Amino acid sequence: MSGDVRAFSRHHQLTRKPTTPYRGVHDPRTYTQAARAGATEATRRAIIDAIVALAHERLTLEITLDDVARIAGVSVRTVLRHFGTRDRLLDEAVRVTVAAVESERRVAGDGDAFGTIIDHYELRGDFMRRMLAQEDRDPRIAAFTVPGRLLHRRWVEDVFADALEGSEPERRDELVDLLVVATDLQTWALLRRDRGLERDAVEQRMRTLADRVLAGAVRA
């Protein structure tokens, strides 16, 4: 090798920038970061699930962070690290529950609206009644129940849109009011809990109520 070539090679080795190793999907650090993020999300979800489960059994004002941590299988310190305060945890639990309620009530395509709403009440009806009983004492519960009433009215307007089409505004409002009652949580509770009827019998009676309302709309 000539002196000029050796000099160039030496200069190149001294001045070239070090290459950054490629970190693709198979890099161990990528897996570690993904696993850590997954574990963090799983812990957050466990904490939220714990406070929601406790809210099925007692008043929200009676739920302590010690209770939440015990059910979630973590320490109180971990709960606070994820949510900061008990109030923020409650706010997040309300947000997650509202999103779940909206999803459960959604009627897909030509799906059965009555079957959907009854399934929803069977799953969450007792929990929602407990929340309604507390809304005057806990403003965070009102943040869940007040939008819930509006959500149900919008659900009725959407599900029965074809039957309501063409009605005069005042008459339409009356029909929506009656359909809200026919499909309401409290109507389900009266038949399912107070009367002790089976699920299918409750659904049949609520369908009958709605059918009678709509039959009256046709005659009018």
Image (tube, grey):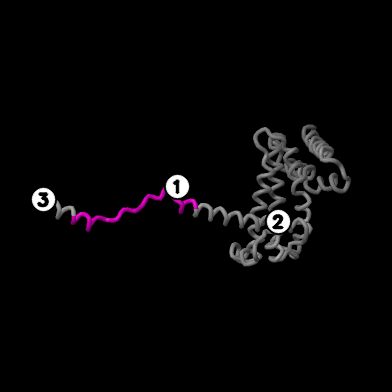
> If you read the primary sequence from the N terminus, does the residue marked by circle 1 or circle 3 appear first?
3
Quadrant where the C terminus is found in the figure: top right
Determine the secondary structure under disc 2.
helix
Above or below: residue 124 compared with residue 90: above
Q: Residue at x 68, y 39 (%)?
A: 107
Furthest residue to the right?
195
Q: Amino acid at mark 1?
A: His
* Residue contact between numbered discs 3 and 2, judged by CB atoms under 8 Å: no
For disc 3, the marked residue is: 2
Mark nearest the camera among 1 and 2 is 1
Which amino acid is tagged 2? Val
- The kind of secondary structure element at disc 3 is loop
Q: Position of residue 115 (x, y in %)?
A: 75, 38
Q: Are the two marked residues, 1 and 2, in contact with CB atoms closer than 8 angstroms?
A: no
Counting the numbered discs, the total is: 3
The residue wearing badge 2 is: 52
Q: Looking at the image, is mark 3 or mark 2 nearer the viewer?
A: 3
Q: Which mark is residue 26?
A: 1
- Which of the marked residues, 3 or 2, is nearer the chain's N terminus? 3
Q: Please name the residue shown 78% across and 47% down the image.
A: 185
Crowding around mark 1 (Cα neighbors within 10 Å: few <14, some 14 to 19, many 20+) is: few
For label 1, the SS is loop
Quick one: 120 or 79, which is closer to the camera? 79
Image spot of residue 195 (x, y percent): 88, 45
**Quadrant assignment, res 163:** top right
Badge 2: residue crowd in 10 Å (few <14, some 14–19, many ≥20):
some
Q: Position of residue 186 (x, y in %)?
A: 80, 49
- The residue segment tinted magenta is 10-31
